[in-house]
Image: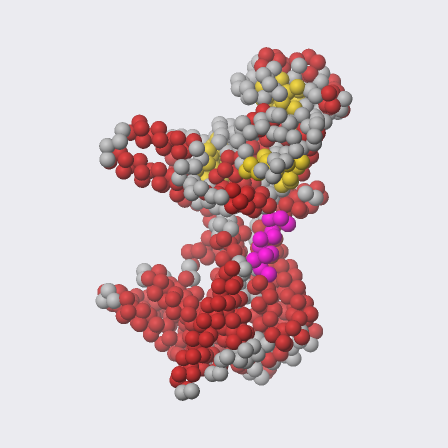
Amino acid sequence: MQEDFRLIVDLVTVLAAAAAGGILAAVLRQPILLGYLLAGMVVGPAGLGLIKELVQVETLAQFGVAFLLFALGVEFSFSELRKVKGISLGGGGLQIVLTIAVTAMVSLGMGWVTSPAQGVFLGAILSLSSTAVVLKCLMERNETATPHGQVMLGILVVQDLALGVMLAVLPALDKPIEEVGLAIGWALLQTGLLGLGAVVAGIWVIPPLLRLLARTESRELFLLGVVAICLGIALLTEHLGLSIEMGAFVAGLMISEVEYADQTLNYVEPLRDIFACLFFAAIGMLIDPIFLWNNLELILGLVALVFVGKFLIVTPLVVIFRYPLKTALITGLGLAQIGEFSFVLASEGQSLGLVSRRVYLLILGTTAVTLVLTPFILRFIPQFFAWAESLPWLKGYLERTDVALEIADELPTQNHVVVCGYGQVGRNIVQLLREHSYPVIVIDQSESRIQEVREAGIAYVYGNAASLHVLEKAGVSTAQGMAITLPDPMSTRLCLKRCLELAPDLDVVVRANQDKDIELLYQLGAKEVVQPEFEASLELSSHLLTGVGLPLPVIQREVQQIRNSHYLDLRSEKPSYQVSRELKEATQEMNNRWYPLPPASPLIGMTVEETDLRRLTGVSLMAIQRADGEELDYPDAKTALQSGDRLLVVGETAELAAFDELAKGEAAVPTENASCQWLLVPDTSPVAGKTLAELHIRRQFGVLIQAIRREGKFIRFPDGASDVQVGDRLLLCGGFYALNRASQWIVPAIEATPVLPMPFTTVAVSESSQESPQAEQV
């Protein structure tokens, strides 16, 4: 076969195999680059041996590395880096230095390498994490704008930027030990001079050239010019003794701040993806599956060492930069892998003779395994925290670290509105409220956003809006309303649930990140759920319908009906199995339990509205599974509980225990024709400082105290030994007249404020509850 035609056959073989491997990886919900690596292993010399001209394929694959780093430079954003500049520059830089130092010492001590230069090279490889895998996982979970997402992306940006420096210094590590220092200094000087030249060219040369190309209005000429710039600068750096990869990255940086950066990236991305596919497939061709199998135990040990080591380096660094422990733990777990650009360093290092082929193959195998495991680890994190918070000692430790980092000097104390999240939506809400002179408190965990709030003179609490401590500092219990505009679904759910623990009657409006979150948020107690895409559809439709002559009252009535129906008219109908799967995925990230109703449960025959589970126990009912197998997801208020039902409930451990008492009949349950209301105990109340057994509230007024809320803690169904303290909120349930008498006694007239009771619930004492210790309070 002719040599030129052989190359074409090899290229077609590699691309076809890579496409098949990528499809397989996507079906298995794995990073696509792992599919490319697998494809290279299959068609390479150690696999089926279909590729004959490996050197020519590798030469073309080098274009893939160049375009990868060029696109990375174009995508690099100093504005994004500034959002988390402290942890990015400080924490990211320290993480790289510490990883290199620790790896060099350990590898030298264990005899894995024979020189400090090789140890530094190995540390550089391990210091990089996977931007592609982490970003994909964060985007799938809508977590790119969360605190841990911002921290991870900030550190990854610094790692990507450090890659350019590493590639510049790498050739210097190949020098004799006595010349290494001088060689590194010369490499850094060359890098600095190259950077200075790039800044000059980026200001005075590149922008006019791109404008000239853009004025031709020819896509082909623009792409040709950009590719020529990229490869030309890459070849220049190669001629100067630096790497092609370094030059490509610098070329991208030169274009990143030009107005045509997005257009450039848009044109180059297809080329980048094709040649990058060749690069990863070529890396796969170098992997020997037999070698991996024979060294599987060692590779798994290295994987464990990498995960544990990077986790122990990253997590404390994030804590040092004043982020909560949860954010630090998620960041540490999320960055505890080796990244795809480590392949670039490893390949360059092998060509320079810094590592043997055996060590090189071990690096490739370890990197591939860590990339496979990362998505599973990030998916497991919510379940890990749910388990951790079920342990009292561990939950207390986690909560102590999730405190308000900073509080404004003057905060409104009552009738204010709390806005959780100061993104674009939150910023607009605050602006409108302030224009009407309503007091506002902003909660946000972003350092840059809190700085904006501080400069604007807005009251704020700097911390995690899903933390009970932070919500208490924001005065949620005395607020008039709350808007939740947090960027990720998990924080939104936790914030909603915990704010209603502090203020069960609070008017809470929530932005749903996805349409599948709408019913879940209503079920958790939101008064109103807004989905931005649906709202945009309603506003556009209203304008058009008004323009064609439909009366405005009719339009307004129809729009309100759609909102009242939770956008059901706009949502595509999903099969029941899909709704059930989405519900289970959502509740997996929260503390949940499938609870079988006892045969003699007093809840049987009552509707969801009558049970009032959220108010009485704190749990939220998500689904009902009937005895015949039928499943009712997101049951409405009129759904009746039946014998044999299994209930999917979400709540804290203590709330689930209170629900267990209620369902078994060990505590009082609502029936008919009575009310429940919360009362705040003032310092002038006659009940302050006394136990429930001393007060005899049931005997005097015929009402029950179903719960006591104190400093964010709940006592469900308190017994006679429970005391009442100033500042407590008491949940009283009983007849309307009895409630009025009891409330006037507990809250003296001078302190009393009108409280509207909830007319749909009643409390009666079952026989079992009359015999329980709780009966002492009444």
Q: In the picture, which quadrant includes the N terminus?
A: bottom left
Can you give x and y, in whole percent of width and height, for residue 187 in the image? Answer: 48, 77
* The residue stretch that appears in magenta: 373-384
Relative height, residue 508 to residue 684 (above, below): below
Q: In percent of the image, x 47 and y 79: which residue is there?
A: 58
Q: In the picture, which quadrant includes the C terminus?
A: top right
* Corner quadrant of residue 658: top right
Residue 329 included in the magenta stretch of the image: no
Relative height, residue 360 to residue 736 (above, below): below
Name the magenta segment's main secondary structure: helix
Q: From where the camera sits, is residue 185 visible?
A: no
Q: In percent of the image, x 58 and y 24: which residue is there?
A: 610
Can you give x and y, in whole percent of width and height, for residue 340 in the image? Answer: 52, 67
Q: From where the camera sits, is residue 745 visible?
A: yes
Can you give x and y, in whole percent of width and height, for residue 628 in the image? Answer: 61, 37
Q: In percent of the image, x 69 and y 76: which residue is there?
A: 111
Can you give x and y, in whole percent of width and height, for residue 249 in the image? Answer: 43, 70
